[in-house]
Amino acid sequence: MGEKNVFTPTFDIKDKENKLVVTTDLPGINKEDIEINLKGACLR
């Protein structure tokens, strides 16, 4: 079987003024290319 390269960044989630703020370092990736979805209690 071939190997799969998986990048799992570390991130912080903070509750600020009734909003979730997610921060992470993603070198080489533009913020416009990032999509975060909330399904139930799971961020995807």
Image (cartoon, rainbow, N blue to C red):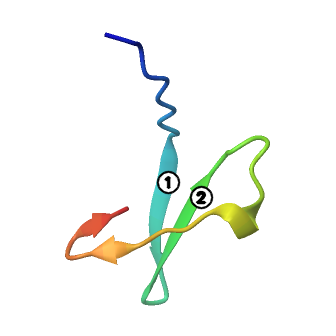
- Quadrant position of the N terminus in the picture: top left
In this view, the residue farthest toward the front is: 1
Residue 25 in percent (x, y) is at: 67, 45
Q: Which residue is mark 2?
A: 23
Bin the neighbour count of mark 2 within 10 Å (Cα to Cα): few under 14, some 14-19, many 20 and up: few
Residue 16 in percent (x, y) is at: 50, 80
Mark 1–mark 2 distance (CA, rounded to whole Å): 5 Å
- Specify which label sits upstream in the sequence, 1 or 2: 1
Which kind of residue does numbered mark 2 sit on? Thr
Q: Residue at x 45, y 61 (%)?
A: 13
Image height check: is 24 above or below 6?
below
In this view, the residue farthest toward the bottom is: 18
* Secondary element at image label 1: strand
Residue 34 in percent (x, y) is at: 62, 63
Res 12 label: 1
Q: Residue at x 53, y 64 (%)?
A: 22
